[in-house]
Image: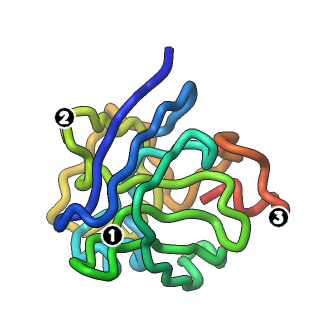
């Protein structure tokens, strides 16, 4: 079943539409996601790069995540809204920020990663698949990364 959703940044300069046969809804508690997003975690839906259409040109910031992987973080240069993350340099998939969805009720997280960095004030949710660090298995959404570690978040 195809999952379709739309969204964009706060000022509307960048919008997107995803039509994906395969997605992954998750929360990331790593310290880099906390700091970049200004919140206790990064809430996102992973889609293959080919399944995401973006209107407007986001600015990109790259850094090394807690996992040691290089991550590209895409945001609006006008309002600063964080829209997506992707493996870098090959953007084979995008993690679309749940807070940018036109319908935020569409987001239904099934996994939590980097729980070892979870803030104490965030209640645990045993209904989700939990990982102390990143996923312990590859996430096979989008084309495989050149570096297999890029597929483990």
Q: Is tag 3's residue or tag 2's residue first in the polypeptide sequence?
A: 2
Q: Is residue 48 above or below residue 38?
A: above
What is the number of the mark on residue 60?
none
Q: CA distance from mark 3 to mark 1?
A: 25 Å
Residue at figure coordinates x 68%, y 54% from the top left: 92
Is 101 positioned to the left or the right of 90 in the image? left
x, y percentage for residue 140? 69, 40
x, y percentage for residue 76? 33, 74
Q: Which residue is mark 3?
A: 147
The way the protein has been coloured in the rendering is rainbow
Which quadrant of the view contains residue 150? bottom right
Q: How crowded is the residue under tag 2: few (<14 C-alpha within 10 Å), some, or many (20+)?
A: few
Q: CA distance from mark 3 to mark 2?
A: 34 Å
Q: Is tag 3's residue or tag 1's residue first in the polypeptide sequence?
A: 1
Q: Which residue is mark 1?
A: 82
Helix, strand or loop status at disc 1: strand
Q: Which residue is mark 2?
A: 105
Q: CA distance from mark 1 to mark 2?
A: 19 Å
């Amino acid at each position: 079943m195809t999952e379709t959703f739309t969204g964009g940044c706060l000022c509307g300069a960048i919008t997107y539409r995803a039509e994906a046969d395969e997605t992954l809804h998750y929360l990331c508690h790593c310290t880099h996601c906390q700091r970049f997003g200004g919140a206790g975690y990064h809430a996102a839906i992973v889609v293959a790069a080919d399944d995401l259409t973006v209107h407007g040109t986001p600015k990109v910031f790259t850094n090394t995540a807690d996992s040691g992987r290089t991550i590209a973080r895409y945001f609006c240069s006008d309002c600063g809204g964080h829209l997506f993350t992707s493996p870098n340099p090959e953007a084979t998939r995008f993690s679309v920020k749940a807070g940018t969805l036109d319908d935020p009720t569409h987001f239904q997280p099934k996994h939590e990663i980097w729980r070892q960095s979870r803030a104490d004030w965030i209640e645990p949710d045993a209904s989700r698949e939990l990982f102390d660090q990143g996923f312990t298995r590859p996430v096979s959404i989008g084309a495989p990364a050149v570096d297999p570690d890029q597929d483990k978040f």
